[in-house]
Image (spheres, helix red, strand yellow):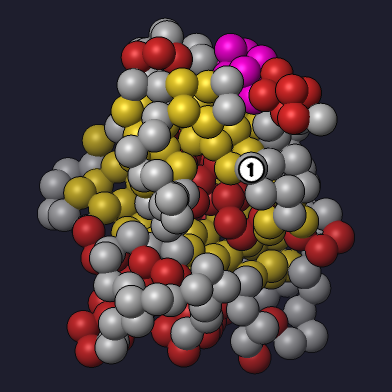
Amino acid sequence: MSYQTELDAALDAADAAGCELLRLYADFQRIPDAPADISTEADRRAQEIILARLQRQFPADAYCAEEGTAALKDRPAQGARLWIIDPIDGTRGFARKNGEFSVMVAFVDRGTIGAGVVLEPARQRLTYAMRGGGCWKRDGSDVPVQIRVSPASRIADATLTRSRSKTDSTSHRVGDLATARVLESYSAGIKLAFVARGEADIYLNFYRAFHDWDICAGHILVDEAGGKVTGLAGETLQYGQPGALQQHGLLATNGRLHDEAVSAVTASARSKA
């Protein structure tokens, strides 16, 4: 089944939100100590723009989004056709004005992700994918090109992407998993795009309670670029469940490293038990 119509709609909605975010970003007063759970008026403005465009085209669909804005009122949050939206993923990056934030829009059809878009407005990087259609990137005004994950075959040679560290940002080790390099970002969408683009080989998220909108759009990027996304112990991730909760952590890799990474992460967890 083709999801071109949904992908085109997601691209249009993300672009409109991204334009508004750049306008707001230019005048935003930097918050150097912005906390992880910060939410701004920009989040809500961007979400309403996305929802207005999608709901006009798909009025009968369900909508799951991070912010409790007016466009979600009386709308189902679960359904066979479901849109999952994070208007600003990495709001700390927006608030601290380091460019590390993204717009994430995904479409899920009966539990299967059909399309996903991760737009980085401040850096003019766009990564998007459609089920069965591959993963593509467009940087600035460049022509879109199809992308694949990296060919790395040894964790010792790999690049790990993770959330910004509060302590040692130079350490390349996470438990029993030691890599050659580390790449940090506030945005999960950006980190998943790193893996899809072959700029990183492994992304680890140890949070045991986060939400569908944090990862859904980025998940299909990695899948369609030839990688693999699961829970930390290799669990299949499901979307559209009650509460939109993800409780298995997240491991995204180029596929070749996945089994080894699961073994390293689970061995580390057992040693701490």
Q: Amino acid at mark 1?
A: Phe
Report x, y in % for residue 106: 56, 55
Q: Is residue 67 above or below residue 168?
A: below
Q: Nearer the viewer, residue 229 or 157?
A: 157
* Rendered residue at 49%/35% (across/down): 203
* Rendered residue at 68%/31% (across/down): 232
| 262 in magenta | yes
Q: Which residue lies most toward the right here? A: 242
Q: Is residue 18 left or right of residue 268?
A: left
Q: Nearer the viewer, residue 5 or 112?
A: 112
Residue 101 visible in the current orientation: yes
Residue 223 visible in the current orientation: no
Q: Is residue 194 left or right of residue 51?
A: left
The residue labelled by disc 1 is 206
Q: Quadrant of the N terminus?
A: top right
Report x, y in % for residue 267: 70, 18
- Quadrant in which residue 84 is drawn: bottom right
Crowding around mark 1 (Cα neighbors within 10 Å: few <14, some 14 to 19, many 20+) is: some
Q: Which residue lies most toward the top here? A: 153
* Rendered residue at 13%/54% (across/down): 141
- The residue tagged with tag 1: helix, strand or loop? loop
| 240 in magenta | no
Q: Nearer the viewer, residue 121 or 136?
A: 121
Q: Is residue 88 above or below residue 250?
A: below
Report x, y in % for residue 52: 53, 81
Region in magenta:
258-265
